[in-house]
Image (tube, rainbow, N blue to C red):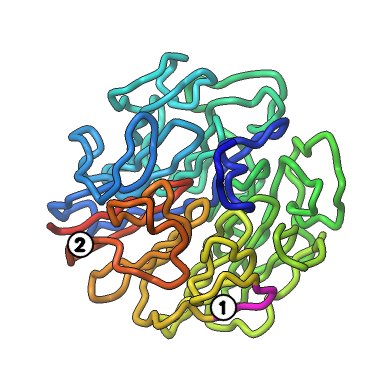
Amino acid sequence: MSVLSRSRRWSRWAVGVVVALSALAVTASPALASAPNVVRLSGTSYPNTSSTPTVVRAEFAGAVAIASGYDFMIALMPDGTLRSSGVNGHGQLGDGTYETRYTPVTVKKVTGVVAIAAGEDYAIALLGNGQLRVWGNSLQGQLGTVGVKFPTPVKYTLAQPARSVAIGDDHVLVSLADGTVVGWGDNYWGQLGNGSSYQWPRVVTPVVATGLTGVTSVAAGRHYSVARRSDGTVWHWGWQSGTSQPILTTPTPVPGLTGATSVSAGADFAVVLLADGTVWTWGDNYSGELGDGTTTDQNLPVPVLGLTGVTRIASGDVHTLALRADGSVWGWGYNHYYALGGGTRDLWNLAAPINALPTSGALAISADRDISMFTSTS
């Protein structure tokens, strides 16, 4: 194993578990769909590495969000379709084959997508009508059916339309139209929130997170779950390794946070955007992923250093991006794989925000694993 931060490199080298990245749920807006956008990627996504934000190849041009699994990437396009590239041994590209694709291909049989999430070798798409489409590896029941692979998207049926979807290390969360949250997958650390922990094998049939109502969005870390309620409060459950937090088997309110507008999660840390434009974080901070100017773990939320006027947040494996109202993009955390740009690996652990995009006019940001995406007008 390479010399890496203690808390995050599970995403590429974990053994014996299915590993996935933090949640990604980005809604495509009409403004994004109609703008003459330039899309840049920075970081590592198979088979390419870009040390500075670089304009993407033509097949991904205009993308409004990305999700990255283990050596594959999926892009959400303005028209609600998906394109994918990378390894495909479990059908995770959704093109009906198991062939590796270096040139992006269209994901089959799925349109009207508004959000995407990727696991290690599977993916989930949220449609505008609240339905889910799933594809890739379900040999251990990741997609609700044990012992199969889905090289083409299939419908995943829930009792209510979905509002948001998130994939953690090896668990899936979905917030529903009635304000409840359901989940399935690994529950060893209580990350499904149903009052249980140390469950094995994984939970295949969705279970309801106990006592949680009014939820509008969810995010998932390695063994950890976060939800935002319509009243602006934030709730969490599961376990953040690297901190002294106990295992929470049922949803618990995060102290001191009100007015939350969105939530995001890295492997072992959480990020919340408040209505006043400030950003607050807590959890593991070995690589500076909390952005508070230190590398000290935090059990309670702390403000990101000097950051105001933020309108969107997005977290990858060990880094976070923030889009400000002036169109600038700021980032902090682990940069060994160039997720924050900068052109050099010397900037490994950035504990305070830096300007991550050398141009103005950013419209959207997206992050996953060790990759960042910037959509701008120039």
Of the residues shown, which amino acid type is indicated by label 1?
A: Gly
Callout 1: helix, strand or loop?
loop
Q: How many numbered circles does the render carry?
A: 2
Frontmost residue, 168 versus 246: 246
Q: Residue at x 35, y 35 (%)?
A: 82
* Magenta stretch: includes residue 299: yes
Instruction: Identify whether 320 is placed above or below 48.
Output: below
Q: Is residue 162 left or right of residue 105?
A: right
Residue tagged by mark 2? Answer: 358
Residue 123 placement, left or right of 193: left
Q: Which mark is residue 166?
A: none
Task: Identify residue type, mark 2.
Answer: Pro
Magenta stretch, residue numbers: 298-302
> What is the magenta segment's predominant secondary structure?
strand
Which disc number belongs to residue 232? 1
Q: Quadrant of residue 242?
A: bottom right
